Image (cartoon, coloured by chain):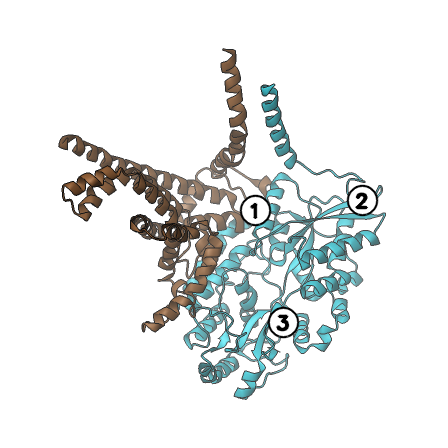
Chain colours: A brown, B cyan
Amino acid sequence: MKSKRSNSLMGMAFFGPALLLLTLFLFLPMLLTLIFSFTDYFALSPDLTHFVGLENFSKIFKDELFSSAFWNTVKFVLIIVPAQSLGALGLALLINKVTICKKYFKVAFFIPVVMSLAVVSNLWMQIYSPEGILNTMLSNIGINTQPFIHSADQALPSIAIMSVWQGVGYQMIIFLGGLQAINPALYEAAEMDHASGWQKFKDITLPELKPLCVFVFITITIGAFRMIVQPMVMTGGGPSHSTYTLVYDIYETGTVNWEIGLASAMAIVFTVFVVILTIIQTIMTKDKEGKHANKKTKNG
Amino acid sequence: MKKGISIGIISLLLSGMLSGCGQKNVNPGDVTGYDEGEAYISMWVHTIEDTPEGQAYKESVEQFNEKFNGTYFADLEFIPRNDSGGGYSDKINASVMSGDLPDVITVDGPNVAAYAANGIIQPLAELTDEERSVYLDSILEQGTYDDKLYALGAMESSVGLYYNKDILQEAGISVPDAEHPWTWSEFTEILEQLKPVMAEKSGYPLDMTFPVGEASIYYYAPFIWSNGGDLVSEDGLTVDSVFNSQENISAIKYFRSLVENEYMSKAPIEKLFESGRAAFKFDGAWEVNTIYESYPDIELGVAPYVVSDNWEGGRYTPTGSWAYAATSKAKNIEAATELVKWMSGTDSGVLLFENTKSMPSTYAAYDQITLFEDDENYKALYEQLRDYGHPRPKTPVYPQVSTSFQQALESVGLSGKDAQKELDKSVERINAKLERYTRK
């Protein structure tokens, strides 16, 4: 009995500091954000704060800028999620096959993940500039100078592509880990049955990687939703708000225009949306897994 | 034993965290130099210590403490900020809430109105006419809100219309004097004349962009002012039929014509002017030093800022920079004012110029710095600032006005959207932010 108590105390001692920090810097701010979202809290005059009920939320839904930020974010997600997950899978498969310089490729593709987003953004500004490396390459194959991040049509895809390049290494490593954990006996058995490469991929590799896919999908989606640094550094949300994202809007509202109350409400809307999306994603991927399992048992 | 350790660790962590917050209470002797009988003045500046700028502030404060030894003691704290001023203003915002503001802070010029309207800063103690007369008009104008003087500039700033002497000479273009700047139509003709010349150099007549951030309103609001327009009303609380006035629409359309006629590149090209591939460039006063130090091949000149055809000789050129103000927490306003006066004064201004080449706030400082007499470009920038300097709009919703202006420039200038529609949209957006001040 006594040792149990001291054990739990010891546990608390290890757990306590982390809990304390989490409470102070995560849970408390989250709670405050929720409370602030129902007030007109203004950073420069906190003494004049009133409860305004749902006013902030009705303001948000009427705000043209917020809705355009919302759609921009959705566009980012729609480009980044498929491109980055397929890219990561492709790279992982390639690296898995490569026998020489495997480490080199792994490191090379992973390096952008380690680099600061601000640095990567600045680098790509040079790449995308009218006299940058990309336009020089294009002019060599006879394509006119493209404005890239300086045009309202091309800015968003340009930034999305750069983001995929930056982030893909992380998911690649995860897939690579998954690939290496697949029991080679499965492939040997398939070979005995004269399975083609595609069949092996479809019936062994993909199903084995499925649990990882859920994780990869969700992390990429949430990451894409949180897009702010790249447009902030590269375009300032422009041209004509074409790369203005939700998190950018929250930042501008809260820190530049000092409207903490309104920004908190935006953050709440944003969080609820992402949570709902994540739940849907989880359910959808789980369902498939369930079906897959059923199929397996039937076949068995 | 183990229990003791764990509880010890937790309480240590807790106390460490709690002591991080809470008001600072400084007693004589706590800080070197702060002696019994001196009034303590705490001050924040928006930079880090290890920069030429930080060193200048540090030295100014040391001089202040020496001069007022026995009466006042100023305690300087450096608060880092990022390029857009983020870190520092976040710290101010947080301290407004927690009540931890020091006695004196630095404020970026355009934010004086918002800070004053929200009671973060208080009016300085009365300055005598003689004390006021040492400052440039633009400094006093920038620091005044609601007819009261709140802030005095640590430095001034200016934007030049720079030109490449060799290129203009080659094209046979002569530059007018400061009283007779080029008008828009004259400038258009010159750009048209330069276009083929610059095309040969695979460049453009103008090195110009509408960057996100403060630069756009800072560089290009003069086009509005010289056209008889304004961005906000006198009291800073109305924008309808001001921000979207006919004058402003024609000014914004002028920018569109610069883009449409390909006098400037739609997408920014790095170092166009510096590499001799542009005849003109709008840039801050710092550009002079950059050209002198890094591009000695460029023969640099400063032309008077371009004016609208309707210009009547009024003030219109860019000004404004960081200023010192006393917060509402300052109990001893006399002491705080004394420090503000010292930090914005001639000695501090000269020191800051020596370290950073930023333009001082007082006439006497310009007289002391020979560069403003000997170097024609510095001289031109100073005279432009002195005779034609116009502060940026004074309104508590300045950040929104600034972003709206940049967005209008970008949408109309670069993307060719309808000027009237874009400016009307801006008015709506600014009005939403103004609500807080107009309903009181």
Question: Percent x, y for residue A108?
Answer: 40, 53
Question: Percent x, y for residue A33?
Answer: 49, 38
- Mark 2 closeness class: few <14, some 14–19, many ≥20 residues within 10 Å: many
- For disc 1, the marked residue is B440
Pointers 2 and 3 in contact (C-beta within 8 Å): no
- Checking the image for residue B34, the label placed there is 2
Mark 3 or mark 1: whose residue is earlier in sequence: 3
In terms of secondary structure, where does tag 1 sit? loop
In terms of secondary structure, where does tag 3 sit? helix
Q: Quadrant of the C terminus of chain A?
A: top left
- Structural distance between the alpha carbons of marks 3 and 1: 52 Å
- Structural distance between the alpha carbons of marks 2 and 3: 41 Å
Q: Looking at numbered disc 3 in the image, what kind of residue is underneath it?
A: Glu
- Mark 1 closeness class: few <14, some 14–19, many ≥20 residues within 10 Å: few
Mark 2 or mark 3: whose residue is earlier in sequence: 2
Q: Chain of mark 3?
A: B
- For disc 3, the marked residue is B293
